[in-house]
Image (tube, helix red, strand yellow):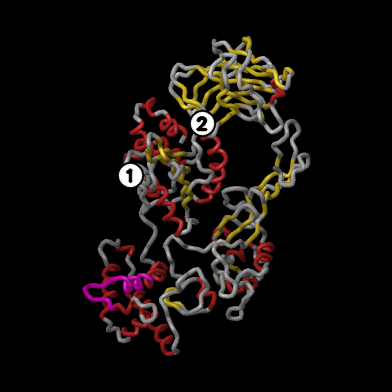
Amino acid sequence: MSEIHKVRENPEFYGLSKEQVAKEIDPYWTHVSYFSDLQLMSKFTGYYGDDIKRDIENMSPLRIGNSDTSCMGKIPKGASLVPITSDRDLSIWGVSVYSDNTKGNLAVAIYSDNQPDSKWIWKSNKEKCTKGENSFFSTSSILKIKKGETVWVALINDSDETSFHLTDSVETWYELEPVKIYSVNTPWNELITENNDVRYPKILGKSKKREGNPIRIELTGKRRNVEKLPITLSSETKSEDLSKYLERLQIPLKEKEGEIQDSQTADALLTSPVFGTGIDVDRLGLMAIMNQPKTTSGYIQATGRVGRQEPGLVITWLRARRARDLDHYENFIGYHRKIHSFVEPVTANPFSHESLELCLGPIIVSILRNAKYVDSVPIPPLWVSDEKGPFQILKNKYGDSDVISAILRILNEIGKSSHIPIHRRNNKFKQELNSQIKKWYDIAEEKQQKGKILPYGQTNPKKPATTDVVLGSPFHEVKGLDAVFSNTRNSMRDTESTAIFYNQSNKAEIRPSQFITRYGPGSLLPTTGASITAPSIGRMFGNLDKPIGNFRETVDGKQQLNKIEINDVNMSRILFQINKEKIPFDDLHIFSMPTNTSLNSTEKNVDADQDIYQGELFPEWGICSRHTGNRIFGKIVYNPRNNTAAVKCPLCKNKYGD
């Protein structure tokens, strides 16, 4: 990401014209990181926002320096003046100074030349010295320097203990004499005020030659400021957000008046295997595989997401201690030359009983409401009506409806298609189909006899259920209402509803299955900022008992968790064995974790983003970064002014740790 930015800023150096550069680097501007599982991806989100963002900002600028480091040495406090001659044309945005310890404070300024009447072009504020690179950046371009030109960098250090990287440059460097301010000679280290401002003289004044190796200093170009939070795509991504993210990934770099416009172009995408078949973003050309996918087919699908329009580059990270990864590495060329011969047979079966029960009914409804003809049979407009449409099924009382017969005919032909492998065909496909039609007929007949309505569905499937419907949601089951086809999906990507875990500064959406297998009480939750831990079961129960939503409502004589008990003999048997049969089998009960969706009710609405379970900040204690020498621990607290977590230091005595 840093190198692509350098190409953008200095296209001529890479043999490109300004007109070409936007088109040439666009495929590689958005970095795609593919993770084989969601858990690994959740660990990386914070790493991107903290470490990678910081490193890119430091590594992306082009640099012009006086020389490389040859040794280390302490320079007496004061002000040094170092010349830097440019070896290229470059727009200067900042200065970097290299030190070998953390003693004292630093500040820099840029002067056009080493003349007594030279005026400063730009100056920085005071910064605490850090080991390694000390970067001073401007929010805009400071000056444009031509190849062969020299500028002078003035450096103030206020400690005799500061150790710098020194160079073997033969150019002479200088020490500035103290300047006259307020009618007295003020030492340079006293020119740094309490509010970090530096009283650099606008006129350079006198200087004298300094002996020894000069300090290593670099002029830096424009740095790449990447987004704190990248785009993330996973099974936890909401369907309504998916199209928004994909549209943003399609936005290319644009060239306007000699400048590349990138404010709307995504910097990075972190994705799980959800970024596979059916997702096409032609402009992407750079991907890192973070952990080899378990299957060759998954590897092909993942890597096929980049390089679709322009040549793509895929970098795969392998683990030497993992036998499969080591085999791929040692046989890299042979494996990739014959990669399609290693593709595993498909394990998913779209014609299984569970798949047909979930999908057949909604498919029939969608055909009836959207098709004009089915197998040359016209579909009457009445089927579209939400009021009368569902009752049109009653015309099939004796199985003599032309419309229903046509639908059954074409779906049966699909079920027997020669394109479906024999071992995947369902011999009971016809019975499954007839069963769905009969179920619809029976419920419609019952509702008509009782004078009740039966719409296809409710306008907002996330709102509490109020009536019987054809296409049901989890609310209908909770409320004890009839649904011809239960738990109808809005998207095949949506498998479970989620619950919001929160603290003052962060939130996480967790599915019930994740809570059982991955994010139980005390575990770190996948967040993009300050870490939070999942609360105990008792704490969660207390959150629900405030009450929230329908938790205290009675449905079919059941209250609280009893309304969502899971009756699974196999799970109960496993739990019985884990507890070494100490608890009687009949006393074991398994409950689904209440989610925002399942807690919703007509009387007490629960929004999809409403806070449900309160977690804790993690860790509870941290080291205050405002001190040198002795390290001071402070409690990590929430700062309501900027919605972040910070260390409340007993020495600083700041209320919010800032």
Residue ID for mark 1: 308
Left or right position of 32 against 607: left
Which residue sits furthest left?
376
Identified at 69% across, 17% down, the residue is 178
- State whether residue 392 appears in this view: yes
Q: Is residue 469 magenta?
A: no
Identified at 36% across, 50% down, the residue is 280
Instruction: Bin the neighbour count of mark 1 within 10 Å (Cα to Cα): few under 14, some 14-19, many 20 and up.
Output: some
Residue ID for mark 2: 59
Cα distance between the residues tagged 1 and 2: 29 Å
Residue 424, quarter of picture: bottom left
**Which residue type carries mark 2?**
Met
**Which residue type carries mark 1?**
Arg
Tell me the magenta residue range. 362-380
Image coordinates of residue 166 in percent, x first then y, are 60, 17
Image coordinates of residue 368 in percent, x first then y, are 32, 74
Image coordinates of residue 366 in percent, x first then y, are 35, 70
Contact flag, marks 1 and 2 (Cβ < 8 Å): no
Task: Give SS at disc 2.
Answer: helix
| Disc number placed over residue 470 in the picture, else none | none
